[in-house]
Amino acid sequence: MNAIMPNMDLATRILIVDDDPGIRRLISSFLDKHGFQTATAANPIEMREKLAVDHYDLIVLDVMMPREDGLTALRSLQGRDAPAVIMLSAVGSDVDRIVGLEMGAEDYLAKPCNPRELLARIRTVLRRREKGGARSPAAPAAAEDVHDQRRFQGFRIDMDMRMLYDPDDRMVNLTDGEFRLLRAFVEHPRRVLTRDQLLDYARGEDSDHYDRAIDVQVSRLRRKLGETRGGGELIRTVRNEGYLFTPTVAKG
């Protein structure tokens, strides 16, 4: 046993339970690359078979499965030595989330979810369990995992985890280019930024010829921020100059 455990994921065993083989492969492959030991099950019956012969520290459990759903399966995962459970569901309503948490799940994520967010939630749950702490349904991310966060117009962006949440606290899926562009706007709010400045601020290592896509990226970002659904003009075009990010941005 290592006293310091520089990489807490090395010996951690995770079971992914989902009836979709593509999702099982995606999550398993992603977590394997981050040092976890994973196994998969297509349904709760296979889950219980694997639990009977192996120990798992955490289960990623889908809610919507045929014959026996995840919430029913969750009832059988009670007890002092039961693994932690993170629920995944395509039905991301508050009611379903609350029911899952009240039944003993440590956390709940709506599908489709960003694998990076799932990874962050898994690490948070495992750290909390290691310290013997109880889960907090109102705050799924532990305080130690709160990084550089900014807020604008009801949105929340985690600059370190590269995640954006809308005013209903649902994750907005952004491409790498869209995130870099939004970060540039958030770090320079209420200032006119030329296309060349946006290119400099948002450029990544793999962004050759990115300048030619600035206008396209802005259009896509506007759509994802909900401007076309009455969310207001968050990114204003300034003729012959560039773009202006109009909201006030607050830290924390």
Image (tube, helix red, strand yellow):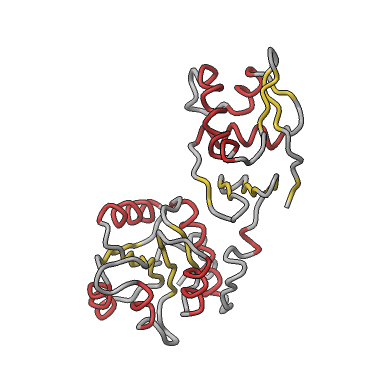
Q: Quadrant of the N terminus?
A: bottom left
Which residue shows up at 28% across the image and 64% down it? 40
Location of residue 136 with respect to 155 vertically, above or below: below
Q: Is residue 86 above or below residue 210?
A: below
Q: Position of residue 45 (x, y in %)?
A: 23, 75
Count of labels shown?
A: 0
Measuring 48% from the left and 60% from the top, which residue is drawn there? 7
Q: Nearer the viewer, residue 112 or 136?
A: 112
Q: Residue furthest top?
A: 240
Pick whichever, 239 or 213, lies toward us. 239
Residue at horizontal 32%, vertical 72%? 69
Q: Choose top left, top right, bottom left or bottom right for residue 20.
A: bottom left
Direction bottom: furthest residue: 79
Asked if residue 150 lies left or right of residue 134, the reply is right
Q: Is residue 246 above or below residue 17?
A: above
Q: Is residue 172 left or right of residue 33?
A: right
Residues 55 and 41: in front is: 41
Residue 186 image point, x, y percent: 68, 37
- Left or right of 157, for residue 216: left
- Residue 230 position in % (x across, y down): 62, 40
Residue 61 position by quadrant: bottom left
Above or below for 151 versus 85: above
Residue 139 percent across, percent down from the top left: 61, 67
